[in-house]
Image (cartoon, helix red, strand yellow):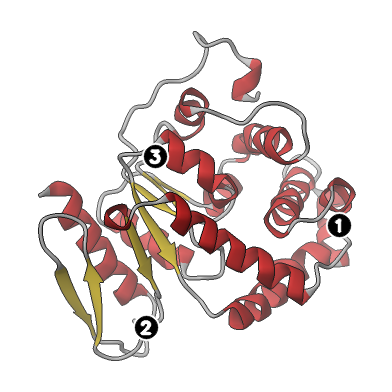
Amino acid sequence: MSPHSKSSTELKTRTVPMRVLVLGFCRTGTSSMRDALRMLGYNDTHHMDSVFRDPSQIGPWTAAIHDKFFGKGKPYGRAEWDSLLGDCQAVTDLPSILFAEDLIEAYPEAKVVLTLRDPDAWYISYDRTIGSILRSRTSYIAGALNPGFLGKFFPFARACSAALLGKDSRAALLGKEETSKDVAKARFVAHYDRVRSLVPPERLLEYRVSEGVATAVRVSWGRSDVVWTVYRGVALKFVLPALLLGVAIYWQTHR
């Protein structure tokens, strides 16, 4: 049930503070960021995997998408987000990034992280993984064979993709239309520019998870800068930088 269909007395209340909003696009290191934040005690950190593991979230998130992007209702405020994300101290990836503006407004005390990637590299990665899966005949067959779970999850994932890349409502329902590279990249760039315009510098960190050997990651949240030097190994190419970033976030928010 959508939070909007409940009265204010029926909405769940927040159990932990919202601390970190990771609002970079999916396929920019969001899974590594999720793992690092969880390891550092940001429980829970919401990610698309959270919805996959808990299908009861599909209905409320689908309602939120329809409300915001397809004119079915009004955008969520803090009470609705507390009801939907009240057990989370951090968010990353879809579906949360679809609501970047709303979450920034709802949680002005939370730090904001933008995970970066070259737009061309991002598009190739997204189209070959998420886009390819959602367009595949296999996903439709799987949904038909497992209507109770995959039959709900794949339409939800397609609605997320439609909202992310600006497809119309028909494409959201059918998931068969491929967004052009130029349109997708423009949406990618516009999202980052919009977040930057909404968040003051002292609250914002931009971070490229796959930065190379001996990369200095400067975190300027608080009274002084903290510099972490990240040495990249083959096996730790993505996890170690994300973990060190998480340490920096933890240090800044707990001192």
Closer to the camera: disc 1 or disc 2?
Answer: 2
Instruction: Identify the image quadrant of the N terminus.
Output: top right
- Mark 2, other Cα within 10 Å: few <14 / some 14–19 / many ≥20: some
The residue at which mark 3 appears reads as 88
Dot 3 surroundings within 10 Å: few (below 14), some, or many (20 or more)?
A: many
Return the x and y of residue 2 as percentages of the image width and height.
64, 25
- The residue type indicated by label 2 comes to Glu
Q: Distance between the Cα atoms at labels 2 and 3? A: 28 Å
Whole-number angstrom distance, CA of label 1 to CA of label 3: 32 Å
Pointer 1 or 2: first along the chain: 1
Residue under the image location 38 percent in, 26 percent down: 14
* Residue corresponding to mark 1: 140
Q: How many marks?
A: 3
Q: CA distance from mark 1 to mark 2?
A: 37 Å
Which label's residue is closer to the chain start, 1 or 3? 3
Labels 1 & 2 near each other (Cβ < 8 A)? no
Residue at numbered disc 2: 211
Amino acid bearing label 3: Cys
Q: Which residue lies at the image location 44% right of the left edge and 43% below the top edge? A: 104
* Residue occupying image coordinates x 33% and y 69%: 242
